[in-house]
Amino acid sequence: MLFQPPLARKYAELDGQTLREGIRRFKDQLGKRLVILGHHYQQDDIIAFADITGDSLKLSQLAAEQADAEFIVFCGVHFMAESADILRRGEQQVILPDLSAGCSMADMATIEQAEVAWKILHRAAGMPITPVTYVNSSAAVKAFVGRNEGACCTSSNARQVVEWALRGARPGDAEDVGNKVLFLPDQHLGRNTAFAMGWPLSSMVVYDPAEPDGGLEPEQVRRARFILWKGHCSVHQLFTPEHVERMRARPEPYQIIVHPECAWEVCQKADDVGSTEYIIRTIREAPEESWWAVGTEIHLVQRLARLYPTRHVRSLTDIQCLCTTMYRIDPRHLYWVLEELVEGRVVNRIRVDDETRRWARVALDRMLSLRPSQPVSAK
Ligand code: 13P
Ligand code: SF4
């Protein structure tokens, strides 16, 4: 985990208008040398300056296509900036405006834990295992997956990647057909994806890196098809089945759509489940005067509500489900990194070492070579 020291005092004294004007001026001065990427969970004051907005998949693909830009300023979290550095061209430099913008889910699987798990699981499995890591993981974990013949996935393409990882195994096949799948670090995306593909919950076990042997008997590993890492998103885990029930009890005809990082029990009760881009598309294309309760990060929900007032969009709960680390990227930090660039200094560069980069790229390229996906659950 990285730490962002406080900015110099002069930045604290800048008001909103000065910050906005300054960011615009620095952008003009840097021209094509700069591209600013903004994840959909960013606050509006940042999205206003993003050249490209998107979910993790779209941003990692588009970052790779930015041939002209010398500087990629990634308004997202650390693992996203690492992915951009892994996919960058030549001498491009990736900058994260606040180094403390990490991801608690990515931190739930360290490379050391993954290496230990791999040995334990191999001893018990009695057949090949394909490791799959959600892109919400460190570059080191991505490289581990690349070295061990696995791939990355995002919430948009998890189903395609898991299908590929199973090496032909289908629900109902004998235990020794195809491969097992180790899914890191989000147990919920792993479970929701496999279940939507027709695999029963009984084919899945949870590996807890805090327990000896992951908390599993060798026989449990041998019988399982999916080994789900015990990690989760602290934002999406806040949604509960009771929130869905309460929304259904309201007089308005809410349709409930949630992100697959939500728990299985929530996804089962919802009307639809899909990635960030899928949620945006569904609401954009929904009929006028439809009603939507959305289970995902609050900045995106509020933006959808403003953009599409006739879709009556609201959060699935009144608890503010905010990604506090994404929120660390604010106009002050953006102003600071751009001012430094204009003055010829690169601050907060995110660099992945060459060996890690090589293998993480293998895992990302395997993912990017697969076709675009269906939503996790087409209910
Ligand atoms: P996607 O951008 O892949 O939908 O993931 C959501 C998320 O939690 C990003 O950190
Ligand atoms: Fe990580 Fe969840 Fe925040 Fe995404 S929303 S960056 S998974 S903590």
Image: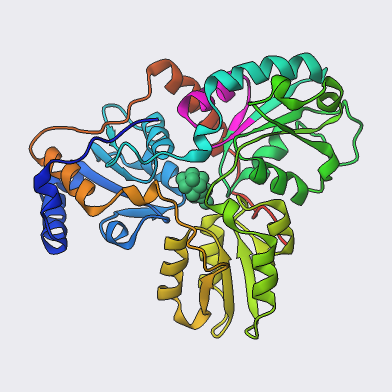
Front-lying residue, 189 or 148: 189
The part of the image, by quadrant, that contains residue 69 is top left
Front-lying residue, 107 or 225: 107
Residue 123 point in image, percent of width and height: 77, 13
78 on left or right of 291: left
Q: Is residue 269 visible?
A: yes
**The C terminus lies in quadrant:** bottom right
Instruction: Identify the residue shown where x is 49% and y is 58%.
Output: 321
Q: Is residue 61 above or below residue 264?
A: above
Front-lying residue, 306 or 365: 306
Residue 5 point in image, percent of width and height: 24, 35
Q: Is residue 362 visible?
A: no
The part of the image, by quadrant, that contains residue 162 is top right
Which stretch appears magenta? 132-151
Q: Is residue 105 magenta?
A: no
Instruction: Identify the residue shown where x is 27% and y is 60%.
Output: 45
Q: Is residue 149 magenta?
A: yes
Residue 306 point in image, percent of width and height: 40, 75
52 on left or right of 137: left
Residue 371 point in image, percent of width and height: 60, 45
The colour mode here is rainbow
166 on left or right of 370: right
Q: How many marks?
A: 0
Instruction: Identify the residue shown where x is 73% and y is 24%.
Output: 129
**The N terminus lies in quadrant:** top left
Q: Is residue 178 above or below residue 290?
A: above
Instruction: Identify the residue shown where x is 51% and y is 35%.
Output: 106
Q: Is residue 229 above or below residue 120?
A: below
